[in-house]
């Protein structure tokens, strides 16, 4: 086993982990504020990828071979905004009425699962009735398919872009949380939601912003995932969402930085172990949850776990 092979696995693992990290941040943000595991979050990722595909089809007259950079980024940008709106609507329509009535957490959890099934069924109908089938190839500018060769190492340019983008978005989220008024409000709300309401803060706006931010990041992760595995389907977010949740827990749910670290670790484990031990390839999807079990056994709060009674994010 040469060093080139090892570096190849590391690069591939961090690229996949970056996609998990983007989705895991959304889990962490919502959990940090509401103590809610939004299991519909993985399907929000799918919504972002599907909306990008649909917009590209509309812009090109369904002739995807004519996609250029400005067209792609325009479609992706609009899709990210629309996905953020979907995230806000899930809060306003599904979660807010339950929170206002003081519903138990199990009701919120069941609602999240219901939203997940609704989004999957909705886009399954759209795909079958209007797009010609459940599974669709995902098209994007050819430049993203370029491959860089460094000795024996093969590096698709996308595997460089996605981790860099993830780090930049992490820095942006941290800037919002620690250097802006809305970020201060988010952290205050996460610490004590009742007191913040008594002080006159618009808690509904703050929570809606958290859902919008998390949904936007999930959409970016979904687009990146669709580009890396150039196909989409209405159920693509189910397993990916569960793995991203595992990444958030491994990193320490409630910690934004921990979510990214957990995503990187999970991606590396998922890629590297089958790479080093090909006979274990059939267990690829199980490694994420095996890692989760081991982390919870030895450090239940996760790698960057924090005391939730004292600190958030």
Image (cartoon, helix red, strand yellow):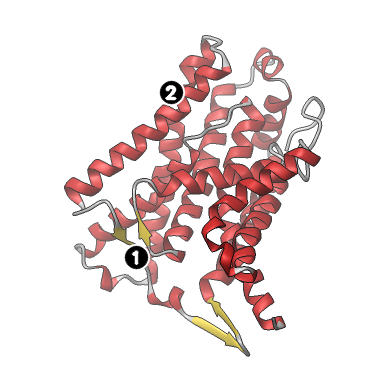
Please rate how many residues cluster around mark 1, counting C-alpha atoms within 10 Å: few if below 14, some from 14 to 19, many from 20.
some
Please name the residue that numbered disc 2 is placed on: 94
Comparing marks 1 and 2, which lies closer to the viewer? 2
Q: In this view, which residue lies farthest toward the top?
A: 101
- Write down the quadrant of residue 304 in the picture: top right
Please name the residue that numbered disc 1 is placed on: 71
Q: 197 left or right of 110?
A: right
63 is higher (above) or lower (below) than 87:
below
217 is higher (above) or lower (below) than 163:
above
Please rate how many residues cluster around mark 2, counting C-alpha atoms within 10 Å: few if below 14, some from 14 to 19, many from 20.
some
Q: Secondary structure at mark 2?
A: helix
Q: In this view, which residue lies farthest toward the bottom?
A: 151
Q: In this view, which residue lies farthest toward the front?
A: 279
Q: Quadrant of the C terminus?
A: top right
**Residue 276 location, x and y as percent?**
65, 70
**Residue 101 location, x and y as percent?**
52, 9
Q: Secondary structure at mark 1?
A: helix
Query: Which residue sits at x=34%, y=32%?
Result: 118
Of marks 1 and 2, which one's residue comes earlier in the chain? 1
Query: Which residue sits at x=37%, y=68%?
Result: 140
- Write down the quadrant of residue 298 in the picture: top right
């Amino acid at each position: 086993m040469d060093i080139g092979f090892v570096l190849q696995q590391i690069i591939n693992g961090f690229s996949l982990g970056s996609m998990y990290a983007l989705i895991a941040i959304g889990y962490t943000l919502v959990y940090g504020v509401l103590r809610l595991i939004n299991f519909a979050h993985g399907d929000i990722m799918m919504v972002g990828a599907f909306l990008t595909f649909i917009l590209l089809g509309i812009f090109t007259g369904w002739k995807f071979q004519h996609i250029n950079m400005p067209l792609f980024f325009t479609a992706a940008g609009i899709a990210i905004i629309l996905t953020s709106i979907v995230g806000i609507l899930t809060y306003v329509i599904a979660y807010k009425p339950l929170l206002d009535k003081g519903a138990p957490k199990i009701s919120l959890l069941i609602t999240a699962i219901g939203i997940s099934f609704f989004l999957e069924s909705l886009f399954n109908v759209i795909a079958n009735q209007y797009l010609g089938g459940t599974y669709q190839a995902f098209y994007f500018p050819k430049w993203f398919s370029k491959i860089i060769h460094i000795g024996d190492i093969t590096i698709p340019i996308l595997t460089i872009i996605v981790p860099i983008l993830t780090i930049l978005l992490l820095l942006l989220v941290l800037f919002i949380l620690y250097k802006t008024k809305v970020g201060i409000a988010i952290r205050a709300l996460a610490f004590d939601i009742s007191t913040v309401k008594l002080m006159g803060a618009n808690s509904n706006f703050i929570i809606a912003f958290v859902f919008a931010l998390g949904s936007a990041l999930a959409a970016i992760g979904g687009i990146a995932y669709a580009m890396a595995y150039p196909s989409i389907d209405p159920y693509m977010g189910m397993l990916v969402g569960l793995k991203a949740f595992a990444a958030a827990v491994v990193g320490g749910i409630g910690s934004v930085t921990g979510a990214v670290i957990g995503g990187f670790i999970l991606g590396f484990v998922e890629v590297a172990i089958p790479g080093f031990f090909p006979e274990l390839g059939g267990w690829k999807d199980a490694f994420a949850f095996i890692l989760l079990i081991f982390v919870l056994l030895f450090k239940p709060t996760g790698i960057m776990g924090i005391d939730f009674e004292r600190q958030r994010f």
